[in-house]
Image: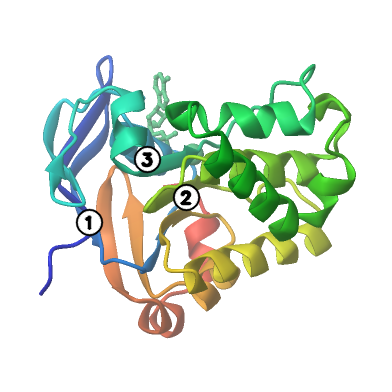
Amino acid sequence: MAEPMLAVEDLEVRHGAIRAVRGVSLHAAPGELVVILGANGAGKSSTLMAIAGALRPASGRIRLNGRDIAGARPERIVRIGLATVPETRDVFPDLTVRENLTLGSFIRRSDRAGVAEDEARMFALFPRLSERAHQPAGTLSGGEQQMLVIARALMSRPRVLLLDEPSLGLAPVIVDQIFAMVAELKQSGLTILLVEQNAAKALAVADRAYVMRLGQIATEGDAAEIRSATDLGALYLGG
Ligand SMILES: Nc1ncnc2c1ncn2[C@@H]1O[C@H](COP(=O)(O)OP(=O)(O)O)[C@@H](O)[C@H]1O
Ligand SMILES: [Mg+2]
């Protein structure tokens, strides 16, 4: 097998005395869309935050495009090619939509032409953001803010995108738009690691899936297999 774009081996993440992630191994091949499912508290966000460098792993190895990133600073990880959309969905509310986007390209500040090109690409991908380019981000709807944080993450030109519950709390029509956009990003060749509560929709777009329970990987397999073999309703129940 070719080297995965992202490989996590035997990851452990702690919050003080709580071992939130225990012995998790997972990988994503170039261009693959991999989903992590699991009940609240299963350790999904802790796993993503450790990969992104926002939490320091207690142990384990993380490789991104052949480079060791475990414990590296978040900015270095972005530079190596990984962008993250955390579940907090934070925009800078007083800055305009365009200014929020520009902040996403901080690692390439001096490349003005490239940044302008990417901004145009984002406005084409997210027409709603284009219409609202000069509005403060705080005036956007929840769905528009989610689109904005995804677009901002893409402004760093990542090879790998981590998405933590992008559909959470959004209206069904917006949820469908988010999943359509994720599928489109996959078509463009991006490697995606998606955390979702909406198991049915996530498995419909994903190549492979991991199900986490109590900080560990309980099940893994092709998305279609997991879809037919698992009682999806059970994934929503407490761990
Ligand atoms: N900042 C934190 N401080 C203490 N415990 C935390 C913190 N964040 C998460 N946890 C705990 O770690 C475990 C995993 O949480 P999390 O990774 O957020 O799970 P998920 O994203 O699957 O809901 C849970 O028991 C949760 O209560
Ligand atoms: Mg979470």
Residue 29 can be seen, yes or no:
yes
- Tally of numbered tags: 3
Question: For residue 207, which quarter of the picture?
Answer: bottom left
Circle 3 residues within 10 Å: few <14, some 14–19, many ≥20: many
**Which residue carries the number 2 mark?**
39
Nearer the observer: mark 2 or 3; the answer is 3
Percent position of residue 71, x then y: 19, 25
Q: Quadrant of the N terminus?
A: bottom left
Between disc 2 and disc 3, whose residue precedes?
2
Measure the C-alpha gap from mark 1 to mark 3.
11 Å
Circle 2 residues within 10 Å: few <14, some 14–19, many ≥20: some
Percent position of residue 84, x then y: 46, 39
Q: Nearer the viewer, residue 48 or 2?
A: 2
The kind of residue on which mark 3 rests is Leu
The label number, if any, that marks residue 26 in the structure image: 1
Between disc 1 and disc 2, whose residue precedes?
1
Q: Is residue 48 above or below residue 2?
A: above
SS assignment at label 1: strand
Mark 2 in CB contact with mark 3 (< 8 angstroms)? no
**Which residue carries the number 3 mark?**
48
Label 2 lies in ligand 1 vicinity (Cβ under 8 Å):
yes
Label 3 lies in ligand 1 vicinity (Cβ under 8 Å):
yes
Measure the C-alpha gap from mark 1 to mark 2.
18 Å
Question: For residue 172, which quarter of the picture?
Answer: bottom right
Specify how the rendered protein is coloured.
rainbow
SS assignment at label 3: helix
Circle 1 residues within 10 Å: few <14, some 14–19, many ≥20: some
Please state if 148 lies on the left or on the right of 5 as rendered.
Answer: right
Between disc 1 and disc 3, whose residue precedes?
1
